[in-house]
Image (cartoon, grey):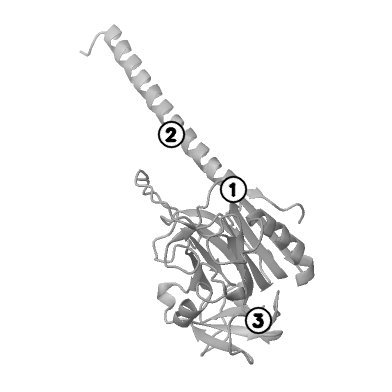
Amino acid sequence: FGAPAGRLRILDHRRSTTTTRTMLVFALVGACALAAATAVAARVSVVQKSRATPAELLPAIDDFRVKLGCCPVTAAGLQPNAYREGNWEQISGLGGPTAFTFAALLTNTFNAVAPNSLPLGVTLRAPAKAEPASGIVRNGPATVAGAAFGAFSGTNYFTPQDFTRVAFDFFVAGSATDATTHGFGIVFIDVDSNDSSFVEAFDIDGHRIAKVYARAGAFSFVGLRDTRAASIARVVVQIGNAPVVSGGVQLADGSLDGGEIVDIVAIDNVLFAEPLPVVDDDDDDDDSSDSDDDGDNVDDDGVADNDYDDDDDDD
C-alpha cells in the first residue's frame, strides 16, 4: 500500500539534501588537496640544462650557486647563508681508474675530507639492496662501454659499479647530526636519453618533494630548490639506466636492451646550500608519503614529475 505521496516527497527531499551535502564535502576535500599540491609544487624551483662542453654549462651552474647562497664555505663552522660544493678531486691515490667500496667512501670522503680540508656535510651511499657496493673514480677522458666521459671540473669523475642509484644524506658538516638543505644540484656526464637519469628529493620523513630528470647532453645539470625552507634531507640520484659492471655481460652504451636504449652515465660536481640542523616538530602527525615501499625511497613510475617553477630562462 505504501506511504502517502506527501511523505515520499519529504523523504526524497531529505535524501537529495544529504546527497548534496556529501557532494559538497567531497568537493571541499578535493579543493583542499589540490591547493596543497599546488602549494608544494609552487615552492620548488628547478633548473635543467644540458650543453656540449663544461664552459657552456658553467653559466647555469654559476647562477644556481648564487641562488643557493652568498658564497662557498671557506671556513670551519656552520654558515647558514653559504653553500658547499664538492667533486672527485679529493679522492687520493689516483693513477687511473680507482675502485672503492661505499663503506670506505662514507668513512673518508665528503663529510670528513673535502676541498680546503673542510667537510661537506653529506654522505654518499648505495641502496641497501646493492650493498656491498663499489664505485669507480676515473681520471681524465675515457670511453667506457661506448660512453664518452670527461670531467666537468678538474680531471676526476664518478661512475657507480654494478648499480645505477645513489643517495646523498645531509648532516651538519663534520658531524653526525642530521640536517636538511634548501637546494641541491649535480652534474651528469654523457646523458643520451631524457628519461634515464634524475634527481629525487625527500624530506626528513621520507615524503617526496620533487623528481627532476636530466636533459640529454654531453654535460647536463639538474638543480632544485625549496624556496620556502630547508626541507631536503635526502637526495636520490639515478645515474643512467645501465651500470658499469665488474663481471658478467657489459651492455654497450647506445645499444638496445628490451626495447630500451642503454644509457651509461657518470656524475661530477655536487653542490648544495649549507645543511642546517633538523628541528623536531612533534605536532607534525602527517603520515602520508609519496615514496614507494621497496626500501629505496624512489618510485619506478618513469614519469617526469617536473611540474614546478622553472628557473630556466631558455632551453
Q: Which residue is mark 3?
A: 156
Q: Give the position of the C terminus as an image quadrant.
A: bottom right
Could you tell me the amino acid type at mark 3? Answer: Asn
Q: Is residue 13 visible?
A: yes
Foreground mark, 2 or 3, reads 3
Element marked by disc 2: helix
Q: Write the residue at 32% across / 11% down.
A: 9
> Residue 12 or 315: which is nearer the viewer?
315
Q: Closer to the N terminus: mark 1 or mark 2?
A: 2
Could you tell me the amino acid type at mark 2? Answer: Val
- In the image, 205: left or right of 78? left
25 to 294, vertically: above or below: above
Q: Position of residue 236 (x, y in %)?
A: 51, 65
- In the image, 272: left or right of 19? right
Residue 90: give its label. none
Q: Position of residue 290 (x, y in %)?
A: 45, 53
Q: Write the residue at 67% across / 50% down.
A: 310
> Residue 292 or 52: which is nearer the viewer?
52
- Mark 3–mark 1 Cα distance, whole angstroms, equals 32 Å
Q: Closer to the N terminus: mark 2 or mark 3?
A: 2
> Residue 56 or 81: which is nearer the viewer?
81
Foreground mark, 1 or 2, reads 1
Residue 227: give its label. 1
201 to 119, vertically: above or below: above
Q: Are marks 2 and 3 in contact (CB under 8 Å)?
A: no
